[in-house]
Every structure is written in C-alpha cells, then in structure tokens.
Image (cartoon, grey):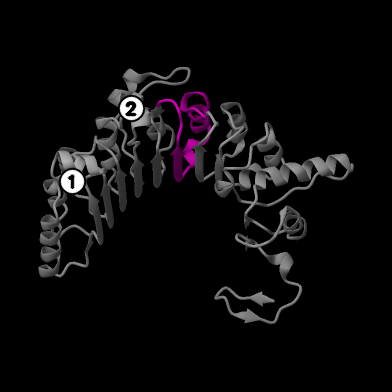
Amino acid sequence: MSFDESGNEVEKVGQCKLIEHLDIKETSLTERGVKMALENLPNLKELNCDHSLIEILTEMHQEACEQKKKIPSYSLTMLDNADMKDVPYHTGSLRIALSLICPSSIKRLVLCTDEGLTDDELPVLSALTMLEDLTIASTGDVYLTFGGGVYPLLKAIGNSLDALNLHGLMDEVDIYAIIEFCPNLKKLVFFLNPVYSTAKFGTGHNPKRRRTEHTILQNLETLSITDIFSIEFSEYQSGEFPHESLLLLLSSPSLKKISVNNCDTLTDDILSQAVHLHGFTRLKSLKILGCPNVTNRGIDLFMNETNPLRRIHVYSQRTQREREIAPSPITLKDIEDWKLKAEEENWELEIN
C-alpha cells in the first residue's frame, strides 16, 4: 500500500527504494525490521523508530566484519535516540555508527541515554561540520560535562548549529562560550542543568575578555530555560542562571518564543531592560512559569498595541508551601484585567 504526500492511498508498486523519510514509531517492528529498512532503502535520510539507531548501526558494522562483507554506508541526515534513554550506551558505538554515514550529511543528532556515555565519546562528533541541530542529555548514571566534553565540541562545530539543547550537564554550563561558539543559533534550550557560569573552560579561554564582549545572538528565535527547583539540588543554589547572561539572551532581537520555568533570576527589571532594548517586536509566545520574582508589572510591559504577542502563559508560584507563605505576585484579577484589555483592544491574544 502506498500513500502520496497528502496521505491519500495511491496505486504504486516498487517505489519503496525512493523513500527518504520513514516513521515506524509505535509499531511492532523489531530491530531486524529496522535493519531491513536500512539495507533496502538506499535513499533513506530520516528514520524514526523505537530502537537505538546508534546501537543498530554498530551491530550492522560488526555483522559485516564477522561475515567479511563490505562495510555498508547510509545517507541518513539524523540520528535520534531521544526515546531510547533506557538503552545502555556501549563504548565506541557512536564512532562506529558514524563511520557508516557521511559526516557532512548529518544535520540532526540527539544523544540521550542514562548509562555508558562519557565525555570521551564526544570528540568523534567534531567531524560533523554540517550539523544543524544538537541535543545532548545527561541523565541517570551518565556523567557528561560541559568543560570536558561539550565545550571542545561546540568550539569545533558550533558555527554550523541552528539549534542546541543541553539537558542535565553536571558541571558549570558556560553561557558565554555558547554565545561565542554558536553565533547562528535560532533555538537554544537549557533544561535542568544545575550550575551555570560565565567562565571558564578550555585552553586559551579568557573570562576577562569574555566580559567585555557582550555579543548578542542576533538570529535567536526560541529561548527555553527550565531551572532546577528541588531540595535535592539545594547544593547548587549558588549556580542559578546568571543575571547578566539571562539579560544577554533576552536581548536577542529576533525572539519569537520565550519559555522560562522555575527561574528565580528572571525579574520585572530584567524584562524591562530587555523590552527597552528591542521591544520584543517579533515575540509571539511568552511562557513564564514558577518564576516568583516576576509580577504583574513585568507582564504589563507586553500589554501594548505594538507587541505582536499571540499567547501569554504565566504562573508564579511553584509549590503549596509558597502559596502558604506569601500571596502570588500575579493574581487571577491580573489575568482577568489583561484578558479584558486584550478584548477591548481587539488583540488576538490568548492569556492563561
């Protein structure tokens, strides 16, 4: 059975070898089925499945060596194991898997596993000079660091990146290094990284020079920050998102979507400074959750006719205890007032 681009069934036979994009998630296909797809679809560029492609490619390489066959090669443009974090990573698998793919063809890479992956595995990624979208998630027993693994990688390939997602790195994430090495970013996501800094990793890294170079990510359209809010991470409280770095990221004039969660650093004053820099003239979506230092005054900055916002989602308090200690800085009345103003001004603005 075949389907056209609109999902309509068509009567075509023998066209499978032309398939470039294949999604077999949530199917009963085993790893053998994934291997059959790779072996029989020479034009395949994107393969979404419920198995770790990195481990499957490694097995296919091993099988070819054992059977003394020619090492296969593939045209994949993405490797994504985001749904396979429970599958242990085996040392060397990334190097072997990438040897089966032309390095310049890979545009998207997602590394997410909770066992076996270390900084020593990352240098091989320096060959991916055309990589556009990179996600590195350190969970469970994985100990990936910024200074030992991510920093040298971004220094090598950061210029090509459009999107960067860093999750759970267990040492200081240097935001200035990201800005310096990844000047073309359109999307930047920080998720549950316990510690942030503005210095200092790598040979020749000069934090004093960094502080005089307030480079703005001119192309940044999406900024998402989720800070840790948990008693178990109280030892990292001194490493909260730096004030200067947050303002610098919010100063990007191309921002269309902002999402900030559980961040004590975000305040009315920071929002005011950013608004006065560029007015958020392209901003479509603003999401501020669990940021107790943002009050109605901060949101009022966006309630004007020149702002193109289409959606505001705001909630200040994070726990029942906070609600018991002090009233919320943003009340239901504030939200109703904003809704009323949007209605009176005929703004296409959703507020919740």
Q: Is any atom of residue 109 visible in this view?
A: yes
Residue 149 horizontal/vertical position (percent): 53, 28
Residue 39: x, y in percent?
77, 56
> Where 334 sits versus 181, above or below?
below
Q: Quadrant of residue 184?
A: top left
Please tell me which residue is depicted at 19% across the width and 57% down the height of the picture: 307
Amino acid type shown at disc 2 = Ser
Q: Residue furthest bottom?
A: 11
Residues shaded magenta: 144-172
Looking at the image, which residue is at 37% across and 22% down? 199
Residue 241 vs 207, above or below: the answer is below
**Vertical position of residue 207 compared to residue 48: above or below:** above
Q: Quadrant of the C terminus?
A: bottom left
Where is residue 163? Give x, y as percent.
45, 45
Amino acid type, residue under disc 1 in the picture: Val
Q: CA distance from mark 1 to mark 2?
A: 32 Å
Give yes or no for residue 330 being in the magenta stretch: no
Residue at which label 1 appears? 275
In front: label 1 or label 2: 2
> Could you tell me which residue is drawn at 69 percent across and 82 percent down?
11
Left or right: residue 192 versus residue 30 is left
Q: Residues within 10 Å of mark 2 (few under 14, many from 20)?
A: few
Query: Which of the 4 image quarters holds residue 232?
Result: top left
Quadrant of the rendering where the N terminus is positioned: bottom right
**Which residue was labeled with disc 2?**
234
The residue closer to the viewer here, 257 or 264, is 264
**Residue 166 lies in the magenta-colored region:** yes
- Say which element carries label 2: helix
Residue 223 at x, y percent in the picture? 34, 45
The image quarter in which residue 325 lies: top left
Q: Residue at x 40, y 20 (%)?
A: 200
Instruction: Name the secondary structure under disc 1.
Output: helix
